[in-house]
Image: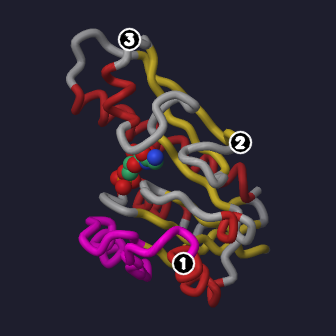
């Protein structure tokens, strides 16, 4: 049995972090067991911090406004003791430096059919577009915004007249389905 140690980085609500933790933490898949060691929030007021406390997942806050390189050195310091096998970004709204991604295999979820609608407003831009489908992408992280080799991608059909909240709920439901699958694909 091999233990796979996970770190999750988030900036806000933390619903993907919580979903991943509930579906994967302390569970065995084939010959691996998944252990969520630590979460890091880039914002001190992120609701995900409360979720971590409720789950019993250790959470550190690293909210400094330093440049990318200095910020990432601090991230590396925090992660060092945990022998992390995979870093999972779950609504972490920062771009990571080469120094970080050269050390840790890192994956991200984005609420659109990449390469369309990158950035912080992927759901709204997909909703407003004239496309008939929308979707969710999970990808390896490189040093550009919402870019890197795709791991999983899935789509929903748009519904005529659907309001933004309902559309957003369906996108999040798809995220909760495909992110755990993508994590297992990467680890197994
Ligand atoms: C998710 O929809 C995720 O795909 C998105 O942020 C949201 C975080 O929600 N990520 C990006 O837009 C990355 N560019 P959560 O904090 O409830 O998981």
Tell me the SS state at disc 3. loop
Could you classify mark 2 by the number of other residues whose Cα lies within 10 Å: few (under 14), some (14-19), or many (20 or more)? few
**Mark with earlier residue (2, 3):** 3
Query: Is 72 on the left-hand or right-hand side of 102?
Result: left
Closest to the observer: 120 or 85? Answer: 120
Residue for badge 1: 70
Residue for badge 3: 130
CA gap, disc 2 and disc 3: 26 Å
Judge whether 29 appears above or below 99 on screen: above
Judge whether 91 appears above or below 48 on screen: above
CA gap, disc 1 and disc 3: 41 Å
Residue visible at 36% across and 75% down in the picture:
63
Q: Which residues, given as a range, are shown in magenta?
A: 41-69
**Quarter occupied by residue 42:** bottom left
Residue visible at 31% across and 34% down in the picture:
168
**Quarter occupied by residue 81:** bottom right
Residue 142 highlighted magenta (yes or no): no
Residue found at the far front of this picture: 67
Residue for badge 2: 149
Ligand 1: does it lie within 8 Å of the C-beta at label 1? no
Residue visible at 30% across and 28% down in the picture:
167
Could you classify mark 3 by the number of other residues whose Cα lies within 10 Å: few (under 14), some (14-19), or many (20 or more)? few
């Amino acid at each position: 049995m091999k233990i796979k140690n996970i770190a999750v980085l988030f900036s806000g609500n933390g619903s993907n972090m919580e979903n991943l933790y509930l579906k994967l933490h302390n569970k065995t898949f084939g010959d691996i067991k998944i252990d969520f060691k630590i979460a890091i929030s880039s914002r001190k007021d992120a609701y995900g911090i409360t979720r971590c406390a409720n789950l019993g997942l250790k959470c550190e806050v690293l909210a400094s406004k330093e440049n990318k390189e200095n910020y990432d050195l601090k991230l590396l310091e925090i992660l060092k003791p945990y022998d992390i096998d995979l870093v999972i970004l779950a609504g972490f709204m920062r771009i990571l430096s080469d120094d970080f991604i050269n050390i840790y295999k890192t994956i991200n979820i984005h609420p659109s059919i990449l390469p369309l609608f990158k950035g912080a407003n992927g759901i709204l831009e997909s909703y407003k577009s004239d496309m008939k489908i929308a979707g969710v992408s999970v990808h390896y992280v490189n040093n550009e915004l919402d870019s890197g080799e795709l791991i999983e991608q899935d789509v929903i059909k748009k519904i005529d007249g659907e309001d933004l909240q309902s559309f957003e709920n369906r996108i999040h439901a798809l995220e909760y389905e495909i992110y755990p699958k993508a994590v297992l694909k990467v680890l197994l």
